[in-house]
Image (tube, rainbow, N blue to C red):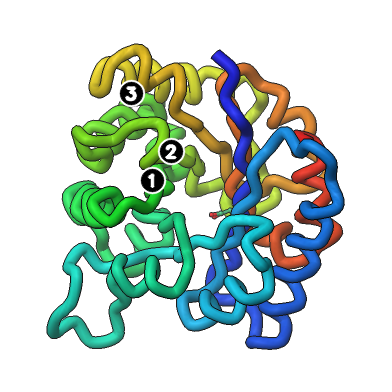
Amino acid sequence: MQRRPLIAGNWKMNCLKEEAYALAKGVAEKYAACTDPECDVLVCPPAIWILPVVDAVKGRVAVGAQDAHAAKSGAHTGDVSVPMIKDAGARFVIVGHSERRADHHETDADVKAKAKAVIADGLTAVICIGETQDQRDAGKTIDVCRTQIQGSVPEEANAQNVVIAYEPVWAIGTGRTPTTKDVEEVHAAVRAEIAAKLGQKVAEEMRILYGGSVKPSNAKELMALQDVDGALVGGASLKVDDFWAIVETCL
Ligand code: 13P
């Protein structure tokens, strides 16, 4: 089964408008200059910059949001709905990032409700899972990921409407990454859990990204692993050249 890799940039709460526009334009122009690129590229700016970023990329790469409310509209001050994100021109929504789970106390049930809303509107959910340092130290990495998949991934998920991102919490923004053997083991277990939940065919087709301190220097090794179908990149997605060097490992 040939899965088309996806390199996604999660800009988190970074960039003012001009920076966001220039970053998106820079990435999109590099992608447009490639003949037959063998991977997809996604940029996920802060919600307020989705409109200018959609304008900047001119349809050359995909744009995503970093979160969405599960309701279509209503009295939810400060939140953004999936129909709004779609109307702005974005096609992906990251849900359940560990920073949302930690900072906003999002549970697996919350993440699942958000993912369902994303799917219902015809967009693709990038569902994040991953263990903390304490959970890893206690030998619970695989159990935690399996539980998060069971709790966060909706039953209607398939390879078109869901991408999984495995991001060990302790690897995010720290410069530390698991060994390639560990990444391989977790990704294989994640795929097996998807198969148990959604069937073998969906599991074989679904993209599972790795995230957590992906850099130009380690991307090639990580992207070459059997069950790794791309990356969710934080810090290194904020510079065109660094992000592009990671994309190039999959082109
Ligand atoms: P870093 O690449 O900065 O470690 O962030 C990873 C991440 O959280 C992407 O969602």
Do we see residue 107 in this rendering? no
Residue 199 coordinates in the image, percent (x, y): 28, 16
Do we see residue 202 in this rendering? yes
Kindly indicate whether the residue at mark 2 contacts the one at mark 1 (C-beta within 8 angstroms).
yes
Of residues 9 and 118, the one drawn nearer to the viewer in this rendering:
118
Badge 1 amino acid = Ile
Secondary structure at badge 1 equals strand
Q: Is residue 144 above or below residue 189?
A: below
Q: Quadrant of the C terminus?
A: top right
**On the image, which quarter does residue 53 sit in?**
bottom right
Secondary structure at badge 2 equals strand
Task: For marks 3 and 2, give the CA distance.
Answer: 10 Å
Task: For marks 1 and 2, give the CA distance.
Answer: 5 Å
Badge 3 amino acid = Ile
> Ligand 1 sits in which quadrant?
bottom right
Q: Circle 3 sits on which residue?
A: 194
Kindly indicate whether the residue at mark 3 contacts the one at mark 1 (C-beta within 8 angstroms).
no
Q: Circle 2 sits on which residue?
A: 164
Residue at left offset 38%, top offset 46%: 127
> Relative to residue 149, is residue 97 drawn left or right?
right
Q: Is residue 27 above or below residue 35?
A: below
Residue 224 coordinates in the image, percent (x, y): 72, 24
Residue 24 coordinates in the image, percent (x, y): 70, 69
Kindly indicate whether the residue at mark 2 contacts the one at mark 3 (C-beta within 8 angstroms).
yes
Q: In terms of sequence position, does the residue under pointer 3 or pointer 2 come before the other?
A: 2
**Residue lying farthest to the left in this orientation:** 75
Residue at left offset 76%, top offset 61%: 27
Secondary structure at badge 3 equals helix
Residue 127 bears which disc, if any?
1
Q: In terms of sequence position, does the residue under pointer 1 or pointer 2 come before the other?
A: 1
